[in-house]
């Protein structure tokens, strides 16, 4: 499921909560509550917008899409509470 979310962001620059709900039978907002809280900082920086129906990468966020996706990567979050970003930043 997380792979699907990350793939949607990387390929389409957006996540549709309803698509994830239909495919996996979960409430996106409930299941990814912690991740949505982490996205709040990126939203303040105008990298993403979290709307009632989904998440969309904004213009600046498209350049940093891997960093946005890292919020949903459970493996990275288990390694540290601080997201690790690419060396290019």
Image: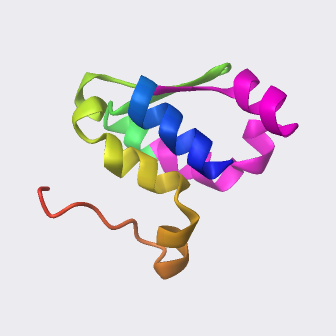
| Residue positioned 40% across, 36% down in the render | 10
In the foreground, 34 or 25: 25
Give the answer, above or below, for where 23 lies relative to 1: above
Quarter of the rendering containing residue 60: top left
Instruction: Report the magenta stretch's main SS.
Output: helix
In the image, residue 4 sits, relative to residue 82, either above or below, namely: above
Q: Quadrant of residue 55?
A: top right
Q: Is residue 54 magenta?
A: no
Q: Residue at x 49, y 39 (%)?
A: 7
Does residue 33 appear to the left or right of 6 in the view shown? Answer: right
Q: Residue at x 80, y 44 (%)?
A: 30
Residue depicted at 15% across the width and 64% down the height: 87
- How far across and how far down the image is residue 37, in percent? 58, 49
Q: Which residues are magenta?
A: 14-40
Residue 51: percent from left, percent from top: 59, 21
Residue furthest to the left: 88
Q: Quadrant of the C terminus?
A: bottom left
Compared across the picture, whether 16 is left or right of 79 comes to right
Examine the rendered structure and indicate whether residue 51 appears above or below residue 11.
Answer: above
């Amino acid at each position: 499921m997380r792979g699907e979310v990350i793939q949607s962001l990387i390929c389409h620059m957006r996540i549709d909560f309803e698509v994830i709900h239909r495919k996996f039978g979960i409430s996106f907002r409930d299941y990814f509550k912690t991740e949505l809280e982490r996205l709040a900082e990126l939203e303040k920086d105008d990298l993403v917008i979290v709307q009632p129906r989904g998440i969309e990468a904004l213009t600046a966020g498209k350049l940093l899409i891997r960093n946005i996706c890292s919020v949903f990567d459970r493996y990275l979050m288990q390694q540290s509470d601080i997201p690790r970003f690419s060396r290019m930043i």
